[in-house]
Image (cartoon, rainbow, N blue to C red):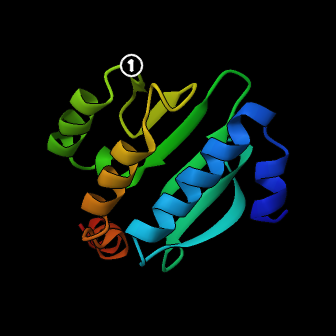
């Protein structure tokens, strides 16, 4: 499945937001390559850095979900963005949101820009060695 097919398969009201999120991720983190792959028993757009998932964008029945591995591994970053998107539901490494009022694209873009400097591939490789 292509990224275009993935987005066009989402509910109509989510397609523009999914496109805006995809564009913001690519614009703010040049280290990632988007692909559609299964994760957690569903297809989603994974944004990979050297084969490692850095971000993921999923569309579920009830909401969109942005998975952010750098945020999962950085509690301070998690707390910072939880304050900026108080209407979204934050979990350890993902943000669930129904629309842009819960997670504005500008806030998500800022999160990705901050995460772009994090070398997730090196971080995960170092973690394996420990």
The residue singled out by tag 1 in the image is: 87
Q: Tally the numbered discs.
A: 1
Of 52 and 95, the residue lying toward us: 95
Residue in the picture at 33% in, 29% down: 85
- Is residue 53 among what the camera can see? no
**Residue at far left of view:** 76
In the figure, is residue 6 to the left or right of 55?
Answer: right
- Is residue 69 among what the camera can see? yes
Q: Quadrant of residue 15?
A: top right
Q: Quadrant of the C terminus?
A: bottom left
Residue in the picture at 60% in, 34% down: 64
How crowded pointer 1 is (Cα within 10 Å; few <14, some 14-19, many 20+) is rated as: some
**In the image, residue 22 lies at what x, y percent?**
57, 58
Q: Is residue 114 above or below residue 68?
A: below
In the figure, is residue 6 to the left or right of 23?
Answer: right
Q: Is label 1 in a helix, a strand or a loop?
A: loop
In the figure, is residue 26 to the left or right of 71?
Answer: right
Residue in the picture at 57% in, 52% down: 20
In the figure, is residue 4 to the left or right of 25?
Answer: right
Q: Is residue 56 above or below residue 41?
A: below
Q: Quadrant of the N terminus?
A: bottom right
**In the image, residue 32 lies at what x, y percent?**
48, 73
**In the image, residue 83 lies at what x, y percent?**
22, 28
Q: Is residue 8 above or below residue 85?
A: below
Of 83 and 52, the residue lying toward us: 83
**In the image, residue 127 lies at what x, y percent?**
28, 65
């Amino acid at each position: 499945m292509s990224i275009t097919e993935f987005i066009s398969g989402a509910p109509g009201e989510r397609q523009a937001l999914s496109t805006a999120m995809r564009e913001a991720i690519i614009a703010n983190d040049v280290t990632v390559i988007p692909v559609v792959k299964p994760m957690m028993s569903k297809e989603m757009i994974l944004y990979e850095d050297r084969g490692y998932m850095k971000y993921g964008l999923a569309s579920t029945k009830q909401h969109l979900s942005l998975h952010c591995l750098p945020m999962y591994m950085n509690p301070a970053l998690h707390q910072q963005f939880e304050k900026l998107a108080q209407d979204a539901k934050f979990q350890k490494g993902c943000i669930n949101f129904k629309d842009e009022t819960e997670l504005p694209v500008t806030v998500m873009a800022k999160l990705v820009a901050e995460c772009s400097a994090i070398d997730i591939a090196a971080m995960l490789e170092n973690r394996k060695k420990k």
